[in-house]
Amino acid sequence: MVDPQQHWESIYRSKATDEVSWFQPHAGSSLRLIHDTDAGLDARIIDVGGGASVLVDNLLDAGYRHLTVLDLSESALAEARKRLGTRASQVSWLASDITQASLPANAYDVWHDRAVFHFLIDPADRARYVQQVLHAVKPGGHVIVATFGPGGPLRCSGLNVVRYAPDTLHAEFGPPFRLLRHETEVHQTPTGKEQEFVYCYCVRT
Ligand SMILES: C[S@@+](CC[C@H](N)C(=O)[O-])C[C@H]1O[C@@H](n2cnc3c(N)ncnc32)[C@H](O)[C@@H]1O
């Protein structure tokens, strides 16, 4: 079995960040959904499996001040830090597996994940992920999770994924999470392929 940490390290070491299929020059949907939570610029936001995504740049540009980026790959985080230059020191960086990370309790107003949860093909890992959200997100906090939709790819980056419709994604999280909104986006990969994503926005009750 592939070690996930080694797998992602080798991906980020072998490809430029704008060559990977999930690359976005601007994290528009994520930024808009985070803005629409009305959590405000003082919100404590964690981007789970943020990798080298520009969401952190976009959030800093928008004036958000309390940002954490967590990822399994040190190389991905190093890439993001390099791109941000001196602004990188305004962000907390956590190199960890989200199913095992030691996160502070009731710490975050907003939990964001684009294209990470769908890699958890073992139900036990998904249960551990949901426990992490319950532990780390404040009651009343906002949870935005984007996965491949029912028409999305079956694999990404050489790994199998689980695809979700909004109701099946929400069902993974269960009653402590109230689904407020969902939307579908067709992502264009750098090679011109289309991938269906489903974004779910829930409140942790
Ligand atoms: C498809 S990429 C998406 C990156 C970023 N969220 C984006 O939208 O550009 C998946 C990311 O999740 C990270 N990842 C995969 N499994 C993880 C896990 N169990 N814990 C933390 N990060 C993980 C990978 O290193 C990679 O950066």
Image (cartoon, rainbow, N blue to C red):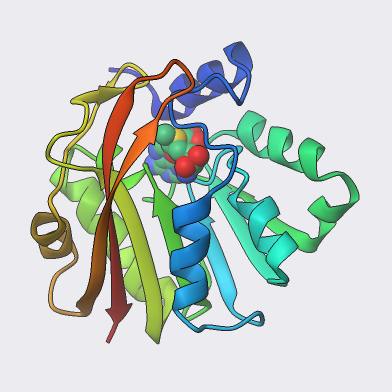
Q: Position of residue 133 (x, y in %)?
A: 36, 67
Find ligand 1 in the image and state its quadrant: top left
Locate the C terminus and report the quarter of the image it occupies.
bottom left
Q: Is residue 76 above or below residue 191?
A: below
Write down the quadrant of residue 142 in the picture: bottom left
In the image, what residue occupies the spot 21% across and 57% down?
Answer: 127
* Residue farthest right in this picture: 86
Q: Is residue 138 left or right of residue 184?
A: right
In the image, what residue occupies the spot 53% across and 49% down?
Answer: 27
Q: Position of residue 62 (x, y in %)?
A: 69, 67
Q: Nearer the viewer, residue 64 or 118?
A: 64
Q: Is residue 51 left or right of residue 129?
A: right
Q: Nearer the viewer, residue 38 or 43?
A: 38
User: Residue 102: in sight, yes or no?
Assistant: no
Write down the quadrant of residue 145 in the picture: bottom left
Q: Nearer the viewer, residue 65 or 25?
A: 25
Q: Is residue 70 above or below residue 60?
A: above
In the image, what residue occupies the spot 46% across and 57% down?
Answer: 30
Q: Position of residue 24 (x, y in %)?
A: 53, 37
Q: Is residue 67 left or right of residue 193?
A: right
Total labels: the figure holds 0
Q: Position of residue 175 (x, y in %)?
A: 13, 78
